[in-house]
């Protein structure tokens, strides 16, 4: 058995090749983090199955079926762009707005001994927590969605634009029972209440508890298809739920809510 030439392999490995591998690994992880727990994963798996099936029928010399699948795959790149348009758009948007640096500001602050970032974040969160406390007490139904970057295409067509400073009284007024904006969701982004009365996509998950109404299903649905998180207050019980990546945490305390928002918002 021939011995493997490790010296030859080491000669081939350079700093450029190491950087190349690391960049590709980061890109793969970054793309995966964008499509994780979204419908895009199922679409990608479906395309992988078609690709494997194509090679199977080709190896079995099934000419007619191979030709049909080959014609379908010949427009593969264009199909990928169309199918994954929302994910590609979000990926480019994140790159353009330095998502990685924004996400790790807390680490920079920690490394340089600064608590300003954490303190400023808690100041932003406080009126939201206070509004949730008030609405929980009065059992006022609410759906508050937090997005890192406001997607005009996704939200503007079905929302009333507000673009206002985050305020406890404003949130309470929006979700007050007789407010014309109380149906739908409030979207918070870029340290502002961007819009209200937003119609969101409902989740297709058929394994949710039967007591979940449209408000819970919309909060879970938007967290499945985007990188948003949602705070849901039940009108029936006043219970607070927190939805992220298609998963929902029930009966969240205000201490937990503060920690979750401080981490994700």
Image (spheres, rainbow, N blue to C red):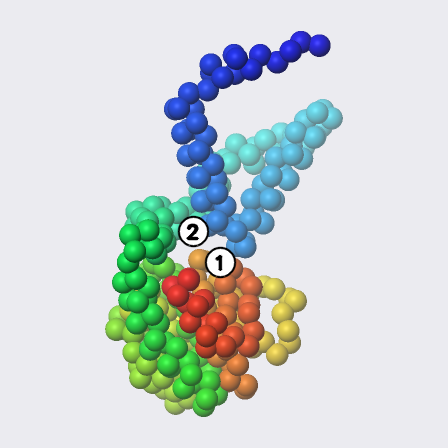
Question: x and y percent of residue 117 in the render?
Answer: 29, 61
The N terminus lies in which quarter of the figure?
top right
- Identify which residue is drawn at 36% across, 53% down: 107
Which residue lies under the disc numbered 2?
86
Specify few, some or many for label 1: CA neighbours under 10 Å numbering under 14, 14-19, or 20 or more.
many
Specify few, some or many for label 2: CA neighbours under 10 Å numbering under 14, 14-19, or 20 or more.
some
Q: Earlier in the sequence, mark 1 or mark 2?
A: 2
The C terminus lies in which quarter of the figure?
bottom left
Q: Is residue 217 left or right of residue 116?
A: right
Name the secondary structure under disc 2. Answer: helix
- Identify which residue is drawn at 33% across, 78% down: 127
- Identify which residue is drawn at 52% across, 75% down: 252
Marks 1 and 2 close (CB-CB < 8 Å): yes
Is residue 9 in sight in this rendering? yes
Is residue 102 in sight in this rendering? no
Is residue 61 positioned above or below 113 on the image?
above
Question: x and y percent of residue 221 in the render?
Answer: 51, 65
Is residue 191 positioned above or below 32 on the image?
below
Is residue 213 positioned above or below 103 on the image?
below
- Residue 9 or residue 247, whichever sits in front: 9
Is residue 39 positioned above or below 65 on the image?
below
Which residue lies under the disc numbered 1?
225
- Residue 2 or residue 194, whichever sits in front: 2
């Amino acid at each position: 058995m021939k011995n493997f030439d490790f010296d030859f392999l080491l000669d081939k490995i350079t700093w450029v090749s190491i950087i190349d591998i690391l960049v590709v690994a980061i890109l793969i992880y970054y793309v995966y983090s964008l499509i994780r727990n979204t419908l895009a994963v199922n679409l990608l798996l479906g395309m992988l199955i078609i690709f494997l099936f194509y090679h199977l029928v080709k190896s079995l010399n099934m000419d007619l079926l191979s030709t049909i699948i080959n014609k379908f795959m010949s427009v593969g790149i264009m199909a990928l762009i169309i199918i994954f348009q929302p994910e590609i758009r979000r990926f480019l948007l994140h790159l353009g707005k330095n998502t990685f640096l924004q996400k790790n500001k807390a680490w920079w602050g920690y490394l340089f001994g600064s608590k300003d970032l954490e303190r400023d974040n808690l100041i932003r969160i406080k009126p939201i927590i206070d509004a949730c406390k008030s609405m929980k007490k009065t059992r006022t139904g609410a759906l508050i969605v937090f997005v890192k970057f406001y997607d005009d295409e996704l939200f503007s067509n079905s929302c009333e634009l507000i673009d206002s400073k985050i305020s406890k009284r404003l949130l309470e007024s929006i979700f007050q029972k007789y407010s014309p904006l109380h149906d739908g969701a409030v979207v918070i982004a870029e340290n502002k209440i961007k819009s209200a009365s937003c119609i969101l996509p409902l989740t297709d998950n058929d394994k949710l508890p039967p007591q979940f109404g449209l408000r819970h299903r919309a909060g879970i649905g938007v967290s499945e298809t985007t990188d948003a998180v949602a705070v849901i207050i039940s009108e029936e019980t006043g219970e607070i739920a927190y939805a992220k990546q298609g998963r929902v945490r029930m009966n969240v305390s205000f201490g937990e809510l503060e920690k979750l928002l401080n981490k994700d918002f």
